[in-house]
Each structure stands twice: as structure tokens, then as C-alpha cells.
Amino acid sequence: MNRRIYGLENEYGIICTSDRRGGKALSIQNAVMYLFREIISGRMYPDVFLENGARFYQDIGCHPEYATPECDNVMDLVTHDKAGERIIERLSVSAERKMRSDGFMGRISVFKNNTDTPGNTYGCHENYLMDRRVSFRQLALQLIPFFVTRQVFAGAGKVKPTNRGGYAISQRAQHIREEISIATTTARGIINTRDEPHADREKYRRLHVIVGDSNMSEFTTYLKVGTTAIVLRMIEDNFIKKRLALRDSVRAIQQISEDTTCTRKIELENGKRLSGVELQWEYLECAKRYFEEVESDPVTDQIMARWEYVLTCLETEPMQLDRELDWVIKKKLIETYVKSRNLKWNSAKVMMLDLQYHNIRPEFGLYYKIEKKGLAERTVTDEQIEHAMHHPPETTRAKFRGRFVKLANERKILCGVNWSYIQLYEPYQKLFLSTDPLQAEYEEASRMIYSI
């Protein structure tokens, strides 16, 4: 597939803390309801589609979750992922005002990370629309080694909450238990069998990826999704011939995460031993040969160039990437702090520093303080993010959905909205179904709805 649908779902951690002025205490459950109050319009459950085509809802465990609208290019996806952060930030500020007017004095902090203090994990889920003709077995065989090693540039970094302390590349790696997990179970796998394409099931499948970290760095998100898309193209075209299967993928993903030098070797089924970076080079070299035979485009060329740049840096000195990669940016920040305060890595102050890196409110979040100083590589602009908060992508099904949601909110139209349909209730009693997420308009729906 030269044109593909991408989506990101990020579950956010939330903390509600009381300030020194006293006032009534507020549970996390109630804090989440305040967060949603401005946009759910009296609904019993916090689950709503927004005017930019995205979905915002409460997931299991009181985690607010933002799912981007369908995007058909990586840059749009990065922009809409960041737009989700800004939407939730504004809702948290609005929620605090409502809380105070009700006598609850405190602050809502929202974190785009993957683990909480007790050690529970919550997800960043990637979604890719794929050609149905690719067998799941082939997909898993060729993707698992890629996902196991992709963390060398896609990890978010984590201070280890152990007696010794220390640092890991990935937050999710230690929670992965299986190579392949069944969609209906709670076990976390490198590849997940969930397949809800929200599209024509005879043509498409949805690859649902739960192995990755949530990222603050735009560069990291761009590279994470962009390289995956390139590998998927090669798999769909049956181009990858080299066998890169690992001896023990679950063990390997944890071993790679534990090694911030990125030099530790993992064993392949054929007995060969490669580091995570070396295995990524195998995929990149394969991609270079692939694009000698098929047409590329400027965005793909940029992803390829950044992929090569990052792997070159990782194999010489990973800390060179202290503007681009989350795990490196955060590690450098914590190293500086630990040295200046003569602290241990497992101290409470260091753990808090780790968490604050992921705070999405720019006045508190450490990543945004770094970005404000011009020390983090950007791929999109603040103006593009602001636009994406209110406008859907122009080239996918989300375009019509977003326009309809805006119209329905303005005119108080009684309706139901989902990824693949729009339903008008009384007095219209109409259901409009779209099985092609790459089509920007529901033509029949447009004619009727805009005549209301």
C-alpha cells in the first residue's frame, strides 16, 4: 500500500493533588469527570468524537485516552498526536477552574507516559491499515524482530524503581510477556491479534501495535511510525527475504531495554548474534534495496535519511542524540541533575523528575521546558498543532466526521458518531456507513446533512 491509514491511541496518566489552601479532597475518578465535563454535554459516560475527527474517552483504570483521527501521512499523524496533548492540557486548566468553583482546591496533572508509581502500565497503541492478503503469520515473523529492536530509537526511557536504580531505554519492554497476544486477553504481546479495520474487511486488516512507548519527542514519533510504515510496505510486497527471527523475542526485548550502550548482542534463531542497532541496520539496508526498485517520495526519503542518521549515532555514541530521542534527552537531563545534587538514581526526587518529563502542561513539563529553550528537534510547528486541534486531516474519512461533529454541536443535532458511521436519530432516522477510510467525503450524507 503506497497510501496507508495511521492512527495513534495514547492513554494518559492523571494525578489530582490538593494545594495548600485546603478544600475538599477529590478522587481520581471525579478528577477525570471534571476533565471531560466541558465536552460530554450531559452524557453518562465520557466518550466523544471531536471536531478535529479524533476520539477522546475514558479507558479502563481512569485513564483518559486520545485517539487521533485517521491520517494518511506521518506528518499529519505527529501533528494530530500533539494536538491531543494540547486539547487535554486546555481541558485540564478548564477542569481546575470548575473544581475550584465547587470547593475543590487542587491541580490536575496529566502525563503522557506508560507506567505509574505502583508499576502498572498503560499503553501507546499504534494502528496501521494493511492489505488483507498478507497473512498474519508472515506479518508476525517479519515484524517481531523489528519491534523488538525499534526501541533503540523509539523508547521513552525510564528510571528503574529498584534498590540499585539505573535506567532503561523502554517503559513498555519490561511488561511484554508474549510474542503474540490474543486481542481478548490482558497479556501484552509484541504483536497483537486485534483486527478491527473499521473498513472493508475483505480488503483491509488493522495492525494493532501495543509494544511501543508514548513519546514526547516529535522526532521520535515521526521516526517510530515512519520506519514501521516502510517495513510494512516491504512485507506487503514480499520483499524481505532474510530470516531475522529471534531465539527468544520476549527476553531479547528486555535485554535491549536494559543496555543504554546499545551494544548488547541478542541471539537469532540461526545462531547469529546481533545488537539491536545491527538488526535495525539489516532492515534499513533492505529498505535501501527496496527503494531502488520502487518509487519513493520526499517524505519517505526524509524518513530513510533520519533512520540512517540515528543508527549511525547509536552505534558510535547514543548520547549524541540528545535533541532527537526521548530516552537520550531524559537520560542526559537526569544525569545532570543527579550529579549536581549528589543523588542516587532510585531517589524520590529522581523518580519525580522522570515523571515530570512527561507532564503535558508546558509550564510544568520538563520536555516542554527543554523544547522552549530550543534544545529539542521539532518536526511540526505550534501553528500546525493549533490548527489540528480544531480541524481534521483533509484527505481521509476524518474530514467529514470532524465537520459533522462541529455542525452537530452547533445545531444540537441528535446523532451517533463512530469511526465508520454517522447515525441521525429522530426525526431523520438515517445511517451513513463509510467502509473506505481513505475517502474524505460521505457524498450522500453531505447532501442531506448540510440541508438540515
Image: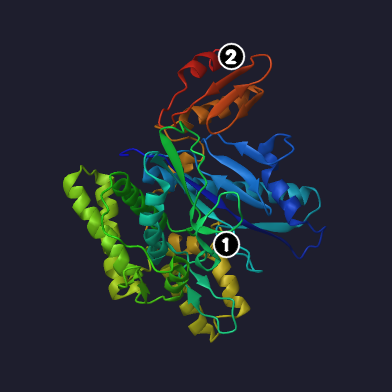
Q: How far is disc 2 from disc 1 in space, using C-alphas?
A: 45 Å
Judge whether residue 258 can be spotted in this image: yes
Give whichever of 4, 12 is nearer the camera: 4
Q: Residue furthest left?
A: 292
Which sits earlier in the primary sequence, circle 2 or circle 1? 1
Choose top left, top right, bottom left or bottom right for residue 57.
top right
Give the percent coordinates (x, y) of residue 135.
39, 45
Whether residue 417 is situated above or below residue 334 in the rendered picture: above
Residue at (72% x, 52% y) in the render:
31
Whether residue 124 is situated above or below residue 167 in the rendered picture: above
Which residue in the structure is indicated by mark 1? 364
Choose top left, top right, bottom left or bottom right for residue 385.
top left
Give whichever of 113, 376 is nearer the camera: 113
Give the percent coordinates (x, y) of residue 204.
42, 36
Q: Which amino acid does label 1 sit on?
A: Phe
Q: Which amino acid does label 2 sit on?
A: Ile
User: Is residue 205 rendered to the left or right of residue 61?
Assistant: left
Query: Which of the labelled discs sits on residue 452, or is there none?
Result: 2
Residue at (55% x, 17% y) in the render:
449
Give the percent coordinates (x, y) of residue 355.
57, 67
